[in-house]
Structure formats: structure tokens, C-alpha cells
Amino acid sequence: MDDQQGGMKMGFGRFAAMIATSTVVMSGLMYLNTYALSHVEFSQTQGWMAVVMGAAMGRAGR
């Protein structure tokens, strides 16, 4: 599975899973700044922010 330069190739499925996992973790980490669990509620803006950050990571890793 080594390419000609000696590095490892990563399949698209593994790369997509890595980006999806990072996106979910980032969206969860955005809630760490809350004082009480009752203050946690879904925010569409934070969801889109996590998706945009995941897309940026996918574009940079291409």
C-alpha cells in the first residue's frame, strides 16, 4: 500500500470518516464553555460552523 514516494495512501472512506469524526468532536467541544448542563441547547449556527470547519479541513487535506 505504499506509493512511489514511500508514503502511505489513505482511502477516501477513511479520510471522510476522519473528517466526519473531527466535525462531530468540534461541535461537541463548542459546548464546553457552558456553565450548567441545562444551558446546553441545539444551535443551528454552531452546527453550520462545525460543518464549515469540517469542509475546510477536507479541502486542506486533499
Image (spheres, grey):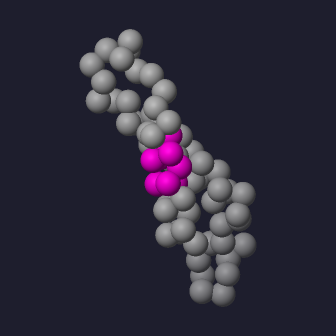
Q: Residue at x 54, y 68 (%)?
A: 59
Give the overall secondary structure of the magenta segment. Answer: helix
Q: In this image, 26 relative to 20: left or right? A: left
How far across and how far down the image is residue 31, in percent?
A: 38, 30
Residue at the limit of the structure toward the bottom, as seen here: 4
List the single residue furthest toward the top.
38
Q: Is residue 19 above or below residue 21?
A: below
User: For the point 66% across and 87% down, which residue is it?
Assistant: 4
Inspect this view and state whether residue 14 appears.
Answer: yes
Whether residue 25 is visible here, answered yes or no, is no
Q: Residue at x 45, y 22 (%)?
A: 41
Q: Is residue 12 above or below residue 23?
A: below
> Is 59 left, or right, of 33 in this rendering?
right
| Residue for point 38% across, 12% down | 38
Quadrant of the image for the C terminus? bottom right
- Compared with 26, 6 (above or below) is below
34 lies above or below 36: below
Magenta-drawn stretch contains 40: no
As rendered, which of 9 and 37 lies closer to the eye? 37
Magenta residues, start to end:
47-54
| Closer to us: 16 or 6 | 16
In which quadrant of the rendered image does the N terminus lie? bottom right
Residue 49: x and y in percent read 45, 47
